Amino acid sequence: DDVAPRLSFFFDCHNDFFEEIAKFRAARRIWANLMKNRFKAKEKRSWLLRFHTQTAGVSLTAQQPQNNVIRVSLQAMAAVLGGTQSLHTNALDEALALPTEEAARLALRTQQILAHETGVTKAIDPVGGSYFIEKLTDQIEAEALKYIHKIEKMGGVVAAIENNYLKNEIAQSSYEYEKKLNSGEQKVVGVNCFEEKEPIKIPIHRISPKVERDQKLKLKALYKKRSSRKVTQTLSELKRAAENNKNTFPYLLKAAHAQATLGEMCDIFREVYGIQEEHPIL
């Protein structure tokens, strides 16, 4: 009860409208049951699954990018109906570049119209009781619990990561999706159906080279201003902490206060822990 109310979660919301609503409902139910029955939490705030949702960047297409406005709108609606507490809506051009100001504004307006014009925020769990949603929620909860129990038998998430189980499951899911996409079983408008002969051109956000030059000048000024002795000392302490398997966070803060850069701190971790290498998918 001291810890659980402080936790929040981050979910993706994809295109299958009803499935996504059911996914969020299942997650809330699983969390409440775990808190009440397994961890014996007494405070009701501990039972609440607080979560942020981002619309699915992976669903955005470079082909006919205006279609992404509709995708994002439906994903955002599903997230709200599923009970999200905060929301990020992707911009229509993010499959091509960082969003332009106009595209980012339109993504924001999508949220504002949902919040202020549709009335969807006036009810809690407004789709609860629908036979289809309830059935989907039950199915997703059951399948999710199978994964949870299987991972627990492996020794937990860390063990599942180390033996590549999670990576293999994600890769297999991605492979199955791509097969359906290539065969046409999975329809994506503008990609494998309802295609346009000529590519649709939209304004693309371009980063000025001046940004890089200005940043390099700021970095040079920082190097001159800061105390090299303090930076070296704090980075050495960070390295010793990492080598001795200590909590490195206090040492990172100390290095940051000494004005060590993020790159310098990451270099310490690369030196101690090495660089992650991709393992073959089994």
Image (spheres, rainbow, N blue to C red):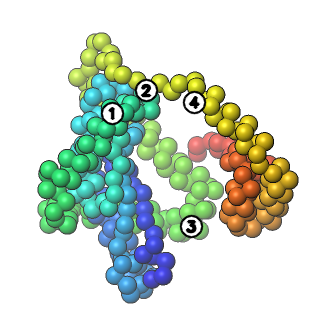
Q: Quadrant of the C terminus?
A: top right
Q: Please give the name of the residue rendered at 60% of the width and 62% of the height, measured from the top-left corner.
A: 158
Mark 1 and mark 3 lie on one chain; the one further toward the N terminus is 1
Mark 2 to mark 1 CA distance (whole Å): 10 Å
Label of residue 156 in the image: 3
Q: Residue at x 38, y 31 (%)?
A: 100
Judge by depth and name the residue closer to the eye, 267 or 126. 267
Within 10 Å of disc 1 (Cα), the crowding (few <14, some 14-19, many 20+) is many
- The span from disc 1 to disc 4 (Cα, nearest Å) is 21 Å
The dot on residue 211 is 4
| Residue ID at (26%, 31%) | 67
In terms of sequence position, does the residue under pointer 1 or pointer 4 come before the other? 1
Q: Does label 2 or label 1 sit earlier along the sequence?
A: 1
Instruction: Tell me the residue that label 2 is attached to.
Output: 205
The disc placed on residue 103 is 1
Q: Nearer the viewer, mark 1 or mark 3?
A: 1
Query: At which x and y percent is residue 280?
Result: 63, 42
Q: How many marks?
A: 4
Task: Examine the rendered structure and indicate whether residue 103 appears above or below residue 52.
Answer: above
Residue 142 appears in the figure: no
> Of label 4 and label 2, which has the lower sequence position?
2
Q: CA distance from mark 4 to mark 2?
A: 14 Å
Viewer-proximal residue among 264 and 224: 224
Disc 2 is placed on an element classified as loop
Q: Identify which amino acid the numbered label 3 is placed on.
A: Gly
The residues tagged by marks 2 and 3 sit, at their Cα atoms, a distance apart of 43 Å
Residue 233 x/y as whole percent: 84, 57
Q: Secondary structure at mark 1?
A: helix
Dot 2, how many residues are within 10 Å of its Cα: few (below 14), some (14-19), or many (20+)?
some
- Where residue 198 sits, quadrant-wise, is top left
> Residues at badges 2 and 1 in contact (C-beta under 8 Å)?
yes
